[in-house]
Amino acid sequence: MDTSLTIALIGGAVALAGQAVAYYFARWRDVRLKEFEIKLKYYQDFLNSFSEYARQATFETQHRFTETVNLMHLMASEAVLGSINKLVNNYNDPDGTADKQWPILNEIIYNMRIDLGGSNRTPSFLGGTKVKPSFQFPMIIPDIENDDQTSDAEQSLPKANRRRSPQKQH
């Protein structure tokens, strides 16, 4: 076989293989980005629904919160699901309290950050901040009474409709 023909065939094969590899990695990056966007939306919905329920416990806010908790099973990492399980156990436990809930919520947020960033560092385009597992994420829950109707849901967990007492940062 002619040397120039062999070189041309090898060059064509390498170019074709290069295109396939480039396509594979581009597709992988796109899938990972889409997964990140979906997880971020689920996590934001969870925190928003938690805040709504803690602010004003009604059937609607409790329903939205439980829906977001249940939807977490679709995309959340194993660590996040383990933390969610602790929250659910506190929710279902007759002795469950808001005091038990806050450390669980910190653990959920910490695991969400790891899930989104791959470490205890959030992605660089989200600020790239590094936090310790013991970090107390500040949560502000309004403590102004709402004059609207109160419901039975106000007595339900999560019992975050009380003000969170400040804790010392580690």
Image (cartoon, rainbow, N blue to C red):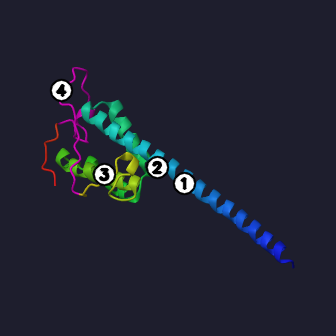
For mark 1, what is the residue? 29
* Callout 1 amino acid: Arg
Who comes first in sequence, dot 2 or dot 1?
1
Of tags 2 and 1, the one toward the viewer is 1
Q: Quadrant of residue 85?
A: bottom left
Decide whether residue 147 is among the magenta residues.
yes
For mark 3, what is the residue? 129
The CA distance from mark 2 to mark 1 is 10 Å
**Residue in the foreground of this view, choosing between 152 and 85:** 85
Residue 124 rendering spot, x and y as whole percentages:
38, 51
> Which residues, given as a range, are shown in magenta?
134-162
Who comes first in sequence, dot 4 or dot 2?
2
The CA distance from mark 1 to mark 3 is 23 Å
Who comes first in sequence, dot 4 or dot 1?
1
Of tags 4 and 2, the one toward the viewer is 2
Quick check: marks 4 and 3 in contact, CB under 8 Å?
A: no
Q: Is residue 141 above or below residue 130?
A: above
Who comes first in sequence, dot 1 or dot 3?
1
> Which residue lies at the image location 51% right of the left edge and 49% below the top edge?
33
Image quadrant where one finds the N terminus: bottom right
* Callout 3 amino acid: Thr
Quick check: marks 4 and 2 in contact, CB under 8 Å?
A: no
> Which residue lies at the image location 44% right of the left edge and 47% below the top edge?
39
For mark 4, what is the residue? 144
> What secondary structure is found at the residue carrying circle 1?
helix
Residue 92 rendering spot, x and y as whole percentages:
28, 48
